[in-house]
Structures are given as structure tokens and as C-alpha cells.
Image (spheres, rainbow, N blue to C red):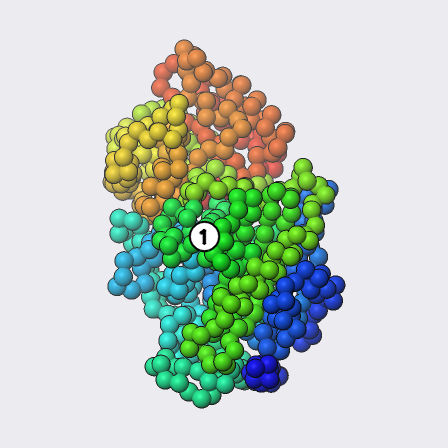
Amino acid sequence: MNLFKLRIGMIVFLSLVGVKIKAQQRLHDMALEQRIRTAASPALKNVLDHPEIYQYQLIYTEITRSSSNLPVFRHEYLNVSDSLYFNPASMVKFPVALMAMEKMDSLRSHGVNPLTLLKTDSNPPESLLELVRKAMIVSDNVAYNKLFQFLGQEAINVRLQEMGYTGSRITRRFIPLTPDQHRLTDAVQLLTTDGRLLLELPAKKSAFPFDFSRRILVGNAHYNWSDSLLQEPFDFTTHNRMPLRDMQKVLQSFLFPFSVPERQRFRLSDATRKLMLDAISELPSESRFPVFDTTEFFDSYSKFFLYRDGKRKVPDHIRIFNKTGWSYGYLIDVAYILDKSRNREFMLSGVIYVNSDGILNDNRYEYDSIGYPFFREIGEILLQSAVANANQSQQLPPVGWHRSGATRPVSAITRGDSTRKALSLVFTGHEFGEGGPTIRGVLKKKGVKASFFLTGDFYRNPKHRKLIRELKADGHYLGGHGDKHLLCCDWSNRDSLLISKEVYQHDIRNNEEAMRAAGVNPAESVYFMPSYEWYNDSIVWWTNQLGRHLVNNTSGTLSQADYTRKQDKNYRSTEAIINSIKDREAKTGLNGYLLLLHIGTGPGRPDPFWNRLEEFINWLQGKGYQLETVPRLLE
């Protein structure tokens, strides 16, 4: 039997000689092998004794923390070679999902967000967030195919090259197409949940210059797409390719972006990064969007290291951020493992080939008898030997530890780039607008652009029509603030909604109709500030469903108190408000701040803020701050 398996392995090895790759050397640490062998069962030792049969590769990365809590990585390898081909299977879904979220963030100015619906065919459209979570949590092929179409083959591979993954390529979807057909992707539409078109992306034809000059042949027979048995190796020459080291680097660059060169970092907003962290760590039973059948998708379904063998339960003190793949007899898992009970963290990446009959596509692979036990035992051995962090009190994992069973879908945007010395002056208005002419005049004099979030009642009020036209002509941002300035959730219990989804979304659409009647195009106003600046997760979710981004003021100052009147218990003078802003600037700076003010207060305020607006802007500019509109600040 071993000689037969050896012949299969040699077919693979000989077919790969001369393949264009980044590195040819075999990386192997005897100390790691010995550590594993010392604790290995006879079955695991048998696998380790036959690398030519099982073609296993393993990367163990010990992570310790510096005194400033920065991760320090030390890699060890077992039989790792970039030249040894294995089919990456569903592992390609991870970089594609990250690129799709990058593209989503880049289209934010068009109203695109995680809840934007992607329509690719005659089937019902699905949100970008749902597609990503399906592809990550249960490795759904259809979801991946749609994300591939959203990006296009050429864009995917250009991005891989930009990031330095020159030995990797993603050429195909998981459907039976020719290499030329995989180059073609149909047009897609991006829609709001009520069916309004945000953007249409045209059909694409990839012109990416793949190098298919070297053949990649595996096995000695295979079934084709017509279920006919062909007595010849399976040809992977034009298939996806991604060495194990590239796979682990992709995960490391996502989890620890500042540990890699800038070109290898994914361009994701903080909110999007949190969504992806959830998608690669949540178990099927924890997901509430979408809900999965846990009979089919048990919790360790995609947790090969430690738990898939025997469908073991993932304990509460373990959190795994990973992606797996399986096809053609190959099993792959690339994981970052957090053990809270031991205060340990490490990365573990592996691949094994289990196909004793040498026939591909016959669905007779030794996943259960050899593959999953290999991942379980390797994980158990290295979990026990992982190094505890010396700086235990300072350790911070890449995401807050939670097993809440609820996805954090989206969040309000409350700050721009904290590394850039820029901020936004934000004015809201509903009933009153008496400060508008003064505010407009100061902004024009100082050459400053600001943002105005106004209710439908404000836009409809004949007294404000001239001011709205002037603000629009001056280049300020004009957005929505709700139609009737409704209080959406209880003041004392933020989780308690006071209105329904239908009422809320109807209020936004009415706000937009009033904007349109006043000469403001709602399609160009994708940032929305909630009435009373008060919201919860549901309000954010419902706003995003309409292709709008919910923004709110940055906390830490008293700027929002400029509406208070002398008789109010919460009255704050303009002097106190300005001092609070100056105190915050001295302590932390105001980079990326959205400073909330009001365009009118009505009678009863003795010292309107706008009377000192020019003085205030002079101070900000003297401190070196650029004053920008909300879209400019956030994009």
C-alpha cells in the first residue's frame, strides 16, 4: 500500500518541477517535529513518517507580547515548501471576502454598506454581509461565487500581486466553467432593501496574464464533470493556487495589520474589520444573521484544529479565528487560536492530502479516518506546549471576547481618521434656523465647508428655502435628520424602540422627498444623522438597509449643548462649551471629530454659539485643523 501511495505522491512532485513560485526551499524545524512526535499517537506518527504520501505541511507561530502589548511572532515549520502544490479549495474565499469588503468600503459614497443587496442573477439578492458570513462561517460556495462576480477575476489577482502574493492566483469560481469562461463576470446591481438601485457594475472580462506554462497533475485517475472515469491524472494547471505561507500571511495581516508591511494590509474601516472578525470566529449556532441549520452545520464544522474530529464541542474559553478548505482529498486550516484560560495565543496552519486510491472526484477520501484526527491531535499537542504571555494583564486579543450569540451588524460612524488633523462642523436643524444666515456668512468668510443635517419639516419650511439654496451653492453638505424629528428609542432604555421599522424608514424617505423638493439630491446625501442624535443597533441597521450611513457626533465635548436655554436644567453657556472643546483638544486632540452644533435654538438662549463661531474657527485653524464636510472627513 505504501509503495502505491508513494507512486501517487511522486506524480504530484514530478509534475511541479519548474513551476513558477516565490521560493523553492523546504522549511523544516526538527525541534518542532520532535516536540510533536514525543506526544504523538501511533496513527499520527505514521502520517509524520510518510510526507511523500500525505504531503502534509504545518506552520506553528508562537505569539508573545512585548511590554507595550505588541505581538511578537516566531514561526516554526514542518515540511513547508511553496513549490509543493495543493488545491487551496475554500481557503480562497477568505482573501476574496476581504477584497469584497474593501470594495464595499470604497463605494461608501454611493450608499453601499454591509446591508446593501447584491443582485447577480435571477435569484433573490442577498446582502454583502450575509454573503461574507455564509462564505466564512459555513464555507458556502454560492456566496463565494457571487463575491467573485462582484469583484471580477482581474481585480482579485491584481490585488494579490499588489500585496506581494506573487505565488498565488485565484482564477475560478466553484462552478464547471472553462478557463476562458472564468474570466467573464456578468453585470451586478447593488440595491437597497426596498429595491432602489444604488449602483450597477458592468460585466467584466479579465485580461490578467496568468502563467500556465507549467502543468500541475495530481493522482492517477479522476472523474470529470460528466461523472466519467478518466484513467489519467487530474489537471490543476489553471486552478487556484495559494501556498500555505501566503495563506497564513493573509490571516496575520488581517488580524495584526501593523505586523506586516503597509502594502500587505487590507484597506478596511474599523467597523468593517469588526464584521470580518465576527465572520471568521463565530460558530454556526451563534449566528443570528443568517441562521444556519446546526444539524448540518455543527459548531466545529469549520474548526479542523482541535474540534472537527468527532464533532467535538468548542469550549467557552477557546476562540478560533480561521478559515478552512477541503476538496480533492486536501484538507486545509489556517487559524489563530486564543486560549483565555491559559492566556495563550498562537497561529497554526496546516494541509494534508488523504486520497489512498489516487482517484480524484470519487468522494472517497480519508477525511474522517486520517485527516480530521491529524488536525485534532496536532492542535492538542501544540495547544499544550504554547507559550503563555508574560504580560498577562496587558494582553488584548484582536476582538473583544464575546459569545453573545448575536452579530454586531453595523455601527454608527462617530469619528473620522484619528491620525489626520481634520474635523467636521456639523449643524442640525428642525424647527428653528435663525442662526443660519450668520453661520453661512462666517463659513464663507473663513473659506470653510460644513455639514447640515436637516429634517423634512426644515426643508419644507418656506422661511428656510433661500438659506438652503445658498448653503447648497456654497458647497456645504446637506443631509437628512428625519422627517418629523421622531424619538426612535427610549431615553432611559436605549434598547427599547418607540417606533417600528416601517415607520422609521418611511420617515427617512419622506425626509428625502422634502430634500428633493428643496433642490437637494438625496442620492448624493448618503450620510444621515438620527433625530435627537439618539439611536440603537436597530436604528443603525434600518438606516443601512436604505443605503444610508448613520453618523453621530463624537463624544467628549459639550458642543451638542448649544441648543440649551437659560431656563433648562442642562443649560450650558457658550463659554463653557468652548472651554470643554479646548480641554478635550489639549488632552487627546480633535482629529476626526464630528462637532455637533445647531442652526437654530429658538428664543431663550442668551448667548447663541454662532455669535462666536468666527472666533472658534480662528482657534481651530490656529491649531492646524482642516475643517471639512462629513463625506470628505470620512472618505
Q: Between 134 and 254, which is closer to the camera in this rendering?
A: 134
State which quarter of the image contains the N terminus.
bottom right
- Direction from residue 458 to residue 369 in the image, left or right: right
Residue 491: percent from left, percent from top: 38, 24
Q: Residue at x 31, y 25 (%)?
A: 431
Q: Is 34 placed above or below 102 here?
A: below
Q: Would you identify the image quadrant in which residue 178 lies?
A: bottom left
> Residue reaching furthest top?
567
> Residue reaching furthest front?
42
Q: Between 111 and 540, which is closer to the camera in this rendering?
A: 540
Instruction: Label 1, secondary structure: give it.
Output: loop
Picture mark count: 1
Q: Which residue is mark 1?
A: 299
**Visible residue check, residue 517:** yes
Residue 370: percent from left, percent from top: 54, 68
**Visible residue check, residue 15:** no
Q: Residues within 10 Å of mark 1 (few under 14, many from 20)?
A: many
Q: Is 368 placed above or below 344 here?
A: below
Residue 49: percent from left, percent from top: 66, 73
Q: Residue at x 49, y 50 (%)?
A: 313
> Residue reaching furthest bottom?
231
Residue 456: percent from left, percent from top: 28, 34
In the rendered structure, which amino acid carries the disc numbered 1? Asp
Q: Residue at x 47, y 56 (%)?
A: 311
Q: Residue at x 39, y 28 (%)?
A: 494
Q: Between 448 and 73, which is closer to the camera in this rendering?
A: 73
Q: Between 414 and 48, which is closer to the camera in this rendering?
A: 48
Q: Would you identify the image quadrant in which residue 362 lies?
A: bottom left
